[in-house]
Image (cartoon, rainbow, N blue to C red):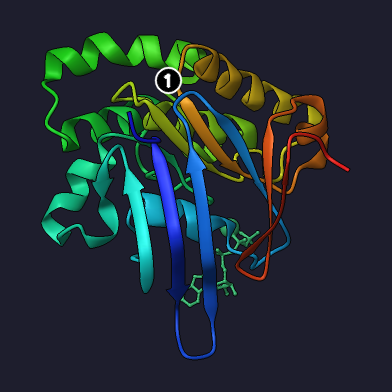
Amino acid sequence: MPSLIQFRNTCVRYSDLVTGLADFSLSVERGEFIYLLGPTGSGKSTILKLLYREVAPTSGEVWLDGENIGQLAERDIPFLRRKMGIVPQDFALLPNKTVWENVGYAMRAIGKGRREVRQTIPRILDQVRIGHRADALPHQLSGGEQQRVAIARSLINDPPLILADEPTGNLDPEHSLEILQILEELNSKGTTVLMATHDMMVVNRCPHRILRMQGGRMQKEGALVV
Ligand SMILES: Nc1ncnc2c1ncn2[C@@H]1O[C@H](COP(=O)(O)OP(=O)(O)OP(=O)(O)O)[C@@H](O)[C@H]1O
Ligand SMILES: [Mg+2]
């Protein structure tokens, strides 16, 4: 079976002056948990965005589950995204909808029936321990709680792959570790996780494979922080 993810000499040029990713190659196997580390602007979000095709490669290839997704037609992108859970860097919650409605709206948008939505949401909200705030609006939640709603919304398809962009950004250590615990639980059941982060406390406390990015290039790879 091919790797779940393969980048082959992938480049992203946002403009003549700005390179997002330069000659990046990587294979990710099913069930891995990978941290993308590196300073601001080093290409972490670009890697994740290539996988959900928010961004297309300027050259090189991106393969997911045996499919060359770099070449995917615009109309096929929504179907690609159903195969993954995306937790964006800004949570992108709908401000006028409750926790329940934010998740329900996402499910309805991908064609799930009302009954399935009603049955599924309690399980998903409990999974990320936010069920008790189902009726709250996003602005009534703490940053960590909003982050959990964003994760809940990414789980609606039971995705085999989760792409999490700074899911512990701005959280205190305790709440960061709670988010990590949720991602690790999913990973222990077989979900592949790619997580961009600056949070060395999390990386040290919950060690996994690490890719260090610098200026759009992979600087270093390793299992432990040095
Ligand atoms: N839509 C865009 N248009 C132009 N340039 C962009 C765009 N998105 C990203 N860039 C540039 O590409 C480079 C890589 O950005 P990227 O968002 O991948 O970095 P990052 O490692 O995720 O940074 P951060 O830690 O701040 O989130 C940066 O120089 C950034 O300014
Ligand atoms: Mg980023």
Taking depth in this image into account, of 53 and 156 the one nearest to the observer is 53
Q: What element carries label 1?
A: loop
Residue at the farthest right position: 226
Name the quarter showing ligand 1. bottom right
* Dot 1 alpha-carbon crowd within 10 angstroms: few under 14, some 14 to 19, many 20 or more: some
| Residue at 62% across, 65% down | 217
Taking depth in this image into account, of 37 and 104 the one nearest to the observer is 37
> Can residue 90 be spotted in the picture?
no
Measured as percent of width and height from the top left, residue 11 is found at 46, 70
Taking depth in this image into account, of 84 and 127 the one nearest to the observer is 84
Residue type at numbered disc 1: Ala
User: From what the image shows, is residue 44 above or below residue 6?
Assistant: below
Measured as percent of width and height from the top left, residue 112 is found at 14, 25
Horizontal side of 204 relative to 45 (left or right) equals right
User: From what the image shows, is residue 76 above or below residue 61?
Assistant: above
The residue at which mark 1 appears reads as: 134
Horizontal side of 212 relative to 78 (left or right) equals right
